[in-house]
Amino acid sequence: MAKKSNPFEYAPALESRSIVDISPSYGLFVDGEFVDGHGHSFKTISPATEEVLAEVAEADAADVDRAVKAARRAHSRVWGRMPGRERAKYLFRIARILQERGRELAVLESIDNGKPIKETRDVDVPIAAAHFFYYAGWADKLEYSGYGSQSLGVAAQVIPWNFPLLMLAWKIAPALACGNTIVLKPAETTPLTALLFAEICQQAELPPGVVNIITGAGETGRALVSHPDVDKVAFTGSTEVGRAIAQAVAGSQKRVTLELGGKAANIVFEDAALDQAVEGIVNGIFFNQGHVCCAGSRLLVQESVADDVLARLKRRMATLRLGDPLDKNTDIGAINSAEQLAKIRELSDIGEQEGAGRWSPPCELPDHGFWFPPTIFTGVTQAHRIAREEIFGPVLSVLTFRTPAEAVAKANNSPYGLSAGIWTEKGSLILKMASSLRAGVVWANTFNKFDPTSPFGGYKESGYGREGGRHGLEGYLK
Amino acid sequence: MTRIDVRKTNKLFIGGEFPRSESGHSYVVNDSRGRFVANVALASRKDARDAVAAARKAFPGWSGRTAYNRGQVLYRVAEVMQDRRPQFVEAVRQGEGGTTAAATKVVDAAIDRLVWYAGWADKLTQVVGNANPVAGPFFNLSTPEPTGVVAVVAPTASSLLGLVSVVAPVVVSGNTAVVAASPERPLAAVTFAEVLATSDVPGGVVNVLTGAFDRTVPTLSSHMDVNAIDLAGLAGDPDQAHACEVAAADNLKRVRRAPVQEPDWTADPGTGPMTAFLETKTVWHPIGV
């Protein structure tokens, strides 16, 4: 046995898997029941071990049609005409079940996605439950929202793999509160918590067809968003797919909201509380392995403190623990898929080729699974691809600036506009920066905070529409 | 001997100036009974791009003004229109036909609509923004901001009231506009541009292109530096509207879709025409010491 270099090294603190029952195979959830899909089934694996977790059905065009028909029926017969105060009770029930089964959901999410258990336990599951709780209360108060109180009809919702349960809650809770029915497609690499959510809908005795969950990949998603009997399309994912969806719904009466990519600037001024800023930088880019559309992936540091900030950042990064997602001490889990790992590697290699300085703390990667160490690139310029393209991994590009005007110009020099961060102790500078940055969410002296009462969404090519808060109702009402 | 009229050749309105079309082309506009009224500039793709550049240049200044000031500028436009009422009545009557009394009603409605929107400038933030009671020690505020440069395909039948009803909501909140005016009935838009030029509206905030839609609208809907597009003028032309929506997807422009048919512009617009071109910005700050 290798001798441990640090006698105070933490012993593993593993969360038990036994709380979760993973079936060997799953069907589609349509009209209140699990049914077989007509497409080929596919496998979902644990990114941390590459172990096959389950076989999942793939929905083909006929399955999509069946799900949309079920949702339409449920909307016209039951859900669309149910008084808001009754709809609210179902949403409150779901919120409570999510809390009661929180441990189970957290473990399953961690296994299927590769993210650390401490994040699923403390972030994904509680915030998902909070969304149902928040929107439950809106269901019988829609006339106070300012957006009308009439539902649109059937909502087609397609969500990504980075926050499978949380994105499901962001999509489903407001849609149901407004009286819409749903066909939701989770990402092909992370379908398991959505399928557990289907069981929760059964447990809450939600009327059949109100929520339908169909699994599959790009083809299934395309069939769903282009289905002629869908009234609303809600998508979170890449800008590339968002663009294709905008084209697909062109000329139709379908409403659409898109939450797309980002390349957020996290701006640190010389008078910032530097240790807090470093925590914010780490949280901004290494939270959820950097698989966050609003991740602070471009660090802009004022030149006068750049060396100091970098030294503190490297020291902090050396304490990050990478490894088993089910270990409660783990800070950085597995990359979600082999495909995503390849993309992160490719862009990082390009960063090196283009002359940026690459650094990672000493870090042992497990033998199996998909892993990428927390990485920073220094000496990055605006022209570098790693400063322009979304990497969607634990990779930070560090740039410098001298004046607030230069910081604004660099931060806004991106087709994206989802989020930004500002670190300074000077209030007037915060307000000036916040109003100058073209981004939908601005975190000042904090980063990556989410709350169901707070609207979230992008400017420019980061998409349109808002999720969360009162504004999040707008996309589901007419 | 009868006096010979001085015939006017109308020009474009770009960046606060009145250039001729870069193409050198113009076209003849007749009144609703087929008699010559004026020559009007036929805008080219290059003119459309120049107008976008002017609108982009004007955006930081216009969006940075106080809402109080933008409201006053819009109100000033209404004042100057009131002054020029006879000229607008003539432009509406020539373009849309009908009696002088009917045209007068349209002009009055257009002036009133501007006054209505002028009053929105400093209230919109209060009505569509809010503080968010997040679960934690944070100060958290959502406020609306203009989305940027908005291309406006103006209604074709209602050349003045329709025009004002789509332009005012775009600029009152701080966006800048590139307007493709009604090709068949451009005179109200031309006169409106002359009013804008003399009523405190900074150059580039509203730019007016006259001429055929097929020369300018495809350029505007695919332009990567246009943030949003209002397709009001493509009512009843679903194919063209579809093509514009597809092109708009390239940089994910916000699209206000073409109605099936041109709506009744005298109806209460509500806040929808303004909120279609707003972004919601949410700012977080910790509360503590």
Image (tube, coloured by chain):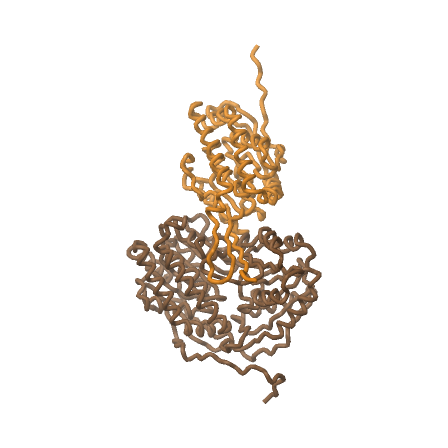
Any part of residue A195 in sight: no
Give the x, y percent position of residue A72. Answer: 33, 56
- Image point 59% across, 20% down: which residue? B6
Please indicate whether residue B179 sits to the left or right of residue A194 in the image.
Answer: right
The chain shown in brown is which? Answer: A
Residue at the farthest left position: A77
The answer to whether any part of residue B72 appears in the image is yes
Q: Where residue A168 sits in the image (x, y, percent)?
A: 43, 63
* Residue A185 picture location, percent across and down: 42, 63
Task: Determine the image quadrant of residue A18.
Answer: bottom left
Q: Nearer the viewer, residue B23 or A177?
A: A177
**Residue A298 vs residue A344, the one in the foreground:** A298
Q: Is residue B231 above or below residue A421?
A: above
Q: Quadrant of the N terminus of chain A?
A: bottom right
Residue at the bottom extreme? A1
Residue B77 falls in which quadrant of the image?
A: top right
Number of disc labels: 0
Q: Is residue B149 above or below residue A216?
A: above
Q: Nearer the viewer, residue A108 or A306?
A: A306
Tell me where residue B22 appears, x and y as whole percent.
63, 36
Residue in view at x 55 percent, y 34 percent: B210
Q: Which chain is orange?
A: B
The quarter holding residue A407 reads bottom right
Residue, far top:
B1
The residue depicted at 56 percent of the width and 39 percent of the height is B69
Report the residue at 61% width, 64% height from top: A277
